[in-house]
Amino acid sequence: MKTIKIHERVIGIFDEKKNRFVKTVSSSRHLFRKFQAYGIDAEFFVKELLPHDTTIYILETDTGKKFKSQAKQWNDKNLFYHFNDEVENKAQIFFPRAEMEEIKDPKLTDVEKTRLLLSL
């Protein structure tokens, strides 16, 4: 497992052995409201996640909701957005939250949820 940083900002945890990427977000801060979608750095997505159809988990820390999807789903129904050069997060691939599978489980703390996702 390795922590992925883009422009010195952590974007998630990538477990190559289990072929999964876990992104922890706050829906109030990270959800691209216009599209109701979450984004992943486009270059990282194309180079690391898409070739292996990596399972992508999105963990909303403020709502406790967890979502699961496959990289190929993101590729098939994505929204590509390139922020201006002044912004640290540049080109991103966005995928609508409504297209993701919501994972239901008992109430857990954020730490327990992250550990659970990493143990899958």
Image (cartoon, rainbow, N blue to C red):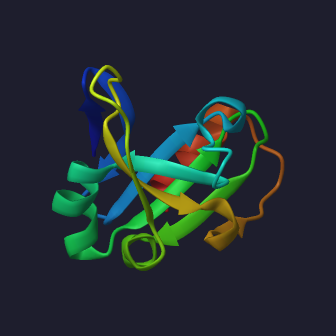
**Residue 57: where, in percent of width, then height?**
52, 57
Q: Tell me: residue 27, above or below residue 120.
A: above
Q: Tell me: residue 44, above or below residue 11.
A: below
Query: Residue at image x 36%, y 29%?
Result: 10
Query: Residue at image x 82%, y 54%?
Result: 106
**In the image shown, does 47 or 92 lie closer to the viewer?**
92
Is 105 situated left or right of 82 in this image? Answer: right
**In the image shown, does 116 or 62 lie closer to the viewer?**
62
Is 2 situated left or right of 29 in this image? Answer: left
**In the image shown, does 7 or 120 lie closer to the viewer?**
7
**Residue 11: where, in percent of width, then height?**
38, 36
Query: Residue at image x 68%, y 35%?
Result: 61
How many numbered markers are drawn?
Answer: 0
**Residue 50: where, in percent of width, then height?**
27, 69
Q: Tell me: residue 115, above or below residue 46.
A: above
**Residue 55: where, in percent of width, then height?**
42, 68
Query: Residue at image x 75%, y 33%?
Result: 62
Is 57 situated left or right of 42 in this image? Answer: right
Is 81 situated left or right of 97 in this image? Answer: left
Can you tell which quarter of the image residue 114 is in?
top right
Q: Tell me: residue 100, above or below residue 21.
A: below
**In the image shown, does 84 or 106 lie closer to the viewer?**
84
Can you tell which quarter of the image residue 19 is in?
bottom left
Residue lying farthest right? 107
Residue lying farthest front? 84
